[in-house]
Structures are given as C-alpha cells and as structure tokens.
Image (spheres, rainbow, N blue to C red):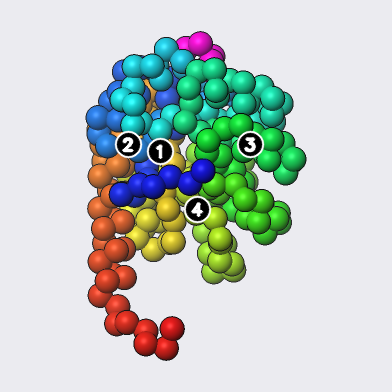
Amino acid sequence: MRLELDRFFVKIDGVTTEEDALMSVGFGASAIGFIFAPSVRQMSPAAVGDIVRRLPSETMTVGVFRNEQPERVAEIANSIGLSAVQLHGNETLEAVRYVAERVRTVIRAVPASSDRLGVIDDANVDYLLLDGDRPGSGEFHDWSVFEQRRFRTPIIAAGGLNPDNVVAIVRDLPVWGVDVSSGVESAPGVKDPGLVADFVNNARWAYEQRDAQIDEQPFDWSR
C-alpha cells in the first residue's frame, strides 16, 4: 500500500535505541528502520516491539529483512505492529508477493546496477529502494540508472548518503524519498543528533528547491 504523504519521505535506518528513534522523529524523520538481518545494528523483535509502542502513532516503522522466510517476515511485522517491511536480499517474486498480501507496505531494496530492475519494477511492490552493489555497506554508487530508464514504482535513494551529498541526490534525481544509516552515525548503531537534524533538513530543503524548479518551467501545451 503506497503512502499518502504531504512532504518528502526521509527514513533513518539502523536505529538501535528508543532514544535515537524518538530523536529522529523529533527532528522530522518520516520513518524509522530496524534491522533484523545479521548486522552490527541487528535488533530482536521483542526489543523493536518495545520501541514501536513508544513512538508517535503516525511514525512509519520499517523492519528490514534479508533472505528471511516470508512467513517469518509477516509474523514479525504483524506481531510487533510494524508499518512496513523492507526486503533487502534475493527474495523471489513469490516471496515478495506472499509478504505483500499480509503486510500493509512493502519496500523492495535492490542494487541500482541490477539487471533485474525491470522485472522488480513490474512486480507491484509499493516502493523500490535503490542501493549500491553491497546493500547496507554505506557505499555511495553511480546514479546513471535514471538516464537509462524510467520507473513506474516510487524510488527511495540509499547508499552512502550523508547530510552533504543528499542535497544533490534529492534536487537532481526523481526520487520519492531517501534512506540513511551510517551517514548520520557517530559509531555503528549510534545516531548523531546533529547529523540526523542536518540530513532531514537538507533533504527537505533540496526537495523544496526541486519543486520550485518544476513550478518555474513553462507549461508544455503539446502534452
């Protein structure tokens, strides 16, 4: 299910504490991501459930999974009240479809260089998250994919983003949202308040600039 948002989507991923979750929401983040896959930021369902219950009801909470059984993904998401799941591995279209039938919103993460972009774009997921060749590594990557194809699915940009480079990504590319983890951390799994605030503010400012540029363009009467 696609969301109806009145502002640009900003997700702070890899959150490991209630304090960081509340801080990110306080600075205006649209969504908080919790990682259930093996990672230095990995969380248990019970710990995430405790945090989710204390967040404002309008906060989007996202569980990030990689190559997990679809039954388990749906069970965890529904049992602790997650708003969405993000599938970050080599899940089959059948597995994605299974989850989508049981969870409100599905984000499908895929490397921007993948030769399966066309197939995944046509798979009726809610959002595509374009990452680097090693998803979750925090490495910046080539964005020329937007010169090669147009997407029917809303795109969330990820991979090596930080408060400095997010401006160009949001201003110059047709993305619906951005996702960041290590780019706003003082240590793995520890979010830096200053970096989180700058990231959210810079992303939203860049989106306003993009909107302004679109509004200033003359109307194309040939359409």
Task: Check contact, mark 2 vs mark 4: CB within 8 A.
Answer: no
Q: Secondary structure at mark 4?
A: strand
Residue 58 horizontal/vertical position (percent): 33, 31
Task: Check contact, mark 3 vs mark 2: CB within 8 A.
Answer: no
Q: Give the residue at mark 1.
A: 11
The 10 Å Cα crowd at callout 1, few under 14, some 14 to 19, many 20 or more, is many
Q: Which residues are magenta?
A: 43-47
Q: Earlier in the sequence, mark 4 or mark 1?
A: 1
Q: Is residue 53 magenta?
A: no
How far separated are the C-alphas under marks 2 and 4?
17 Å
How far separated are the C-alphas under marks 3 and 2?
27 Å
Q: Earlier in the sequence, mark 2 or mark 4?
A: 2
User: Which amino acid does the dot numbered 1 rest on?
Assistant: Lys
Q: Give the residue at mark 2.
A: 29
Query: Is residue 76 shown left or right of residue 123?
Result: left
Q: Quadrant of residue 199?
A: top left
Q: Secondary structure at mark 3?
A: loop
Name the mark on residue 101: 3
Task: Check contact, mark 2 vs mark 1: CB within 8 A.
Answer: yes
The 10 Å Cα crowd at callout 4, few under 14, some 14 to 19, many 20 or more, is many
Q: Give the residue at mark 4.
A: 155
Residue 133 horizontal/vertical position (percent): 62, 46
For marks 3 and 2, give the one nearer the viewer.
3
User: Which amino acid does the dot numbered 2 rest on?
Assistant: Ala
Q: Main secondary structure of the magenta part?
A: helix
How far separated are the C-alphas under marks 3 and 1?
23 Å
In terms of depth relative to the viewer, which is nearer, 6 or 201? 6
User: Which amino acid does the dot numbered 4 rest on?
Assistant: Ile
Q: Earlier in the sequence, mark 3 or mark 1?
A: 1
